[in-house]
Amino acid sequence: MQPPASLEALGDPIYEAFYGLTEQPFAITTDPKFFFLSASHQRAFSELLNGLRRREGLLLLTGETGSGKTTMCRAVLEALGERTFSALILNPYMSGAEVLRIVLRDFGLVTHEELRRGALATADVAQLLDTLEGFLQSLVPLGSHAVIVLDEAQSLSPPVLDQIRLLTALEQQGQRLVQVVLCGQPTILRTLESESMYALNERITRRVALTPLPAEEVRAYIDHRLAVAGGADAVHFDAAAARLVFNLAHGLPRRVNVLCDRALQEGRIEGVNVITPELVKRAARSLAGAHDPTLVAPSEPVPVPAPAPSALPAASAASAAPASIAAAAPSFLTDLSEADDASSPAPTRRRLAIAAAGLAIVAAAVGGGYGYYAHGERSSALAAHAPTPPTRDLGEPAPPLATPPPDEFAKVMETATPRAQGPVPPALDGAQAGSTPGATPPASTNAAPVGPAAPAAQSTPASTTTPSRSTGPSSAAPANGPTPPAAEPPASTPRQ
């Protein structure tokens, strides 16, 4: 371990001074100096570099967030040499004119102040393209070429992508004037498969993808970054700690950087130069928000003897953080609860897990049965105290209503209806009215004047005659009796 720069550095909580590092080994930057060539990264690096040296027009690089795409592009551009003009577009949320202005600025044609207040500040796309094409044509006699890298290409709008396609068509003397590298997450593949992007998708000549680091390369990645920062002999991660970092970070370089940076901070607090799994667990809990009690940092590192190779477990992790904290933690930190505990063998852990699951099932069954029993008892008690509703016997139908005979109905109506003032002709029964010759028909309010007598109608038995209400002066008149005067009609007629 390197000696501290000064006595004040002994009490400095920053671990770079404590371990004698020249810079941060796990900073979240895209410095190509820390670029690590894993198997996947080396293959992608070779493909991109060969495609650009062969002056291929359009290349595609994909990878998950934190897999090292931007660092890869910077390393490729650095490997092309100083005779290559490059433009790196990091902001995808721009219009076509804004993208062209950034390209011209990165190529060195204009400054940032000229873009704000110069002639190109108000230039349209056609003018910007004409300026860019003139610059690209001037590079051909010099043997130089230009490369444009579009980062986060999955967020570019279709018009901007189509404009990029037109740039790749610029040629002079059989050579491409500009090369484009699309760098983005795997979701860009669905965008390129759409019908509107068919022409752009057909121009892609190379497609490479970055994959996470495997478990055996995570420790080499950690040692590489510590060596670049000047701490190859000052501090290191043991095999179990490196394996735990892989389990929690899933091999993504950015997550590895975050976890290792906090683990070195925990090692500084403990004053050790060997990062153990326990320190990695504490770092993961700290990132999840479950901070351990603050310890006083010692003045100098305390060497920790490395365990025997046979005693190193394959994987280990800490117990789960509190549920409220783990719910808000990143996904790779919540995996801490799923890692194996190095202190308990695998068969014992399996037996404990099976026993816990069985107890949970039994508790659920007992609780459900008690709840069902309690609900039944409560229902029975409520039913016992509930009032009994009155019962009604609806078995036999009600008797039919009695209808009075016609003669009784007529008598009742006759007694209930008051007689009109004036003479009323005597009533005739049904037999006399039907057998008297020369009888006149009953008078009606709408009938014509009385004419000759109509022939006698056939007699009807009195028992079948239904009493009816007449609107004329009389229902029947005697054959030989006087006719009532027409000037004084009765107000109402008796009912038969």
Image (cartoon, rainbow, N blue to C red):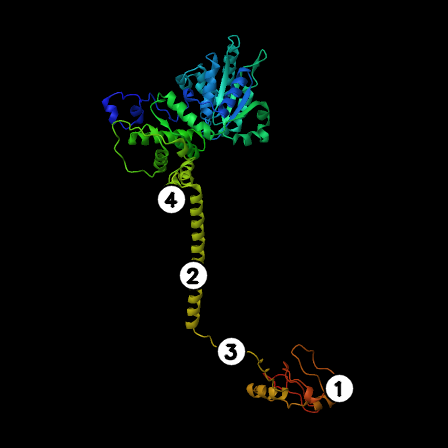
Nearer mark to the viewer, of 1 and 3:
3
For this view, does 352 lie left or right of residue 453?
Answer: left
**Position of residue 358 measured from the top left corner of the image (x, y, whole percent):** 45, 52
Among the two numbered marks 2 and 4 on one chain, the one whose residue lies closer to the N terminus: 4
| Residue carrying label 3 | 392
Which residue is at the front of the view, 318 or 12? 318
Which residue is at the front of the view, 331 or 285? 285
Q: CA distance from mark 4 to mark 3?
A: 62 Å
The amino acid beneath tag 1 is Gln
**Position of residue 168 measured from the top left corner of the image (x, y, whole percent):** 55, 19
Among the two numbered marks 4 and 3 on one chain, the one whose residue lies closer to the N terminus: 4
Q: CA distance from mark 1 to mark 3?
A: 56 Å
| Residue carrying label 1 | 458
**Position of residue 233 measured from the top left corner of the image (x, y, whole percent):** 35, 22
Judged from the image, the secondary structure of the residue bearing numbered disc 2 is: helix
Among the two numbered marks 2 and 1 on one chain, the one whose residue lies closer to the N terminus: 2
Judged from the image, the secondary structure of the residue bearing numbered disc 4 is: helix
| Residue carrying label 2 | 370
Q: CA distance from mark 2 to mark 4?
A: 29 Å
Residue 427 in sight here: yes
Evaluate if marks 1 and 3 touch, with contact meaning CB atoms under 8 Å apart.
no
Q: How many marks?
A: 4
Residue at x-position 43% and y-position 50%: 355
Q: CA distance from mark 2 to mark 1?
A: 92 Å
